Image (cartoon, rainbow, N blue to C red):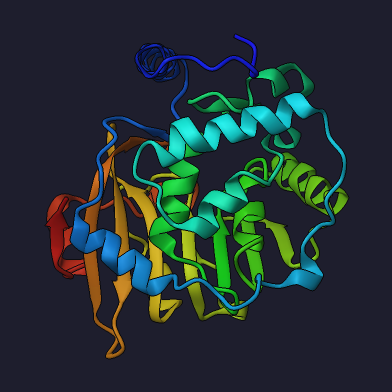
Amino acid sequence: MESTLRPTRARLLVLGLLAFVAGLAVFSGGLIVWPSKMLESDAEDVAQAAQPPSEPAAQADQPAATAEPEVYVQRRRDMVEYQLRARDITDPRVLEVMGRVPRHRFVSEEQQRRAYEDHPLPIGHDQTISQPYIVALMTQLAAPKPGDRALDIGTGSGYQAAILAELCKEVYSIEIVQPLAETAKKRLAQLGYRNITVRSGDGYRGWPEHAPFDVIVLAAAPNHVPQPLIDQLAPGGRLVLPVGGYPQQLTLITKQADGTVRRRTIAPVMFVPMTGEAQRQRKGPADEKRSNPGQDNNL
């Protein structure tokens, strides 16, 4: 369907359902399984944590706007309107950035025409770029602010790092698959991002040299919440990650001023499993409860 057409809402719902089923059958990374609107209390928490800034974050480090084919501009508008705003993405800063970052530049040329569809896409090495909605949802839950330092684990294509870089002062990103890390580093540099540092490595233990972090986003699923990531959260910081088997639970961890943590389950999702030390440190339910004792409110 051409991006300039204006489908009816009913047709959009049907297309969205078909895209969902196709994505579920083919991909296993960054897919929301049963989209669930956040409760009002959670939406208020996010809104309070992400008050609109008086000026955009890190303007000097943001890439300059470049001309691009109008078809991608229109597809991005449609993505924001029908996949994000029509669901429960309400943060104006997240919507604005999702409507500006050229997602098609983070996939192969063969996949570019599908870049703004409502499902994940393969990026090689058995990895995917997450569904646009799940990127927006995780970013909204993380509630990044202009002066924040963010840790992005599972760089993949670099798309999530780019979204965070538009909203934070600096982003540190770790990718365990070395070829993906190298490609993402080059891509982000070509796009003009100067406030993102990418390295290849295992993200299970975070990046202690640059801790504490106000925001941590993990785009692969361990079966438990890694304690080093909680340790590296700044007071008031937020960690967003999928946890468990298939489907996993998208989880929000918030560190309080006294160092205690609050844990909130958001929705079932499907991500690729976290590899490396996360697999060696696999825990059972009882171990997970002891190591992460914070309140778990099912939304």
Residue 167 horizontal side relative to residue 46, left or right: right
Where does residue 195 sit, x and y in percent of width and height? 74, 67
Give me the residue at 65% from left, 71% from top: 57
Does residue 135 appear anywhere in the picture?
Answer: yes
Numbered circles on residues, count: 0
Q: Quadrant of the N terminus?
A: top right
Using the rendered image of the protein, determine whether residue 272 is visible from the camera's viewpoint.
no
Q: Is residue 279 left or right of residue 250?
A: right
**Quadrant of res 75:** top right
For the residue pair 50 and 157, the one nearer the viewer reads as: 50
**Residue at the location (35% across, 55% down)?**
281
Instruction: Give above or below for 32 relative to 292.
Output: above
Left or right placement of residue 252 versus residue 110 in this view? left
Q: Which quarter of the picture shows residue 87?
A: top left
- Snapshot quadrant of residue 244: top left
Q: Judge whether 79 appears above or below 240 on screen.
A: above
Q: Residue at x 14, y 67 (%)?
A: 295
Q: Position of residue 247 (x, y in %)?
A: 27, 33
The residue that appears at 38% across and 58% down in the rendered structure is 141
**Percent coordinates x, y for residue 16 in the rendering:** 40, 19
Q: In terms of depth relative to the viewer, which is nearer, 55 or 154?
A: 55
Direction from residue 186 to residue 235 in the image, left or right: left
Give x and y (percent) for residue 115.
64, 26
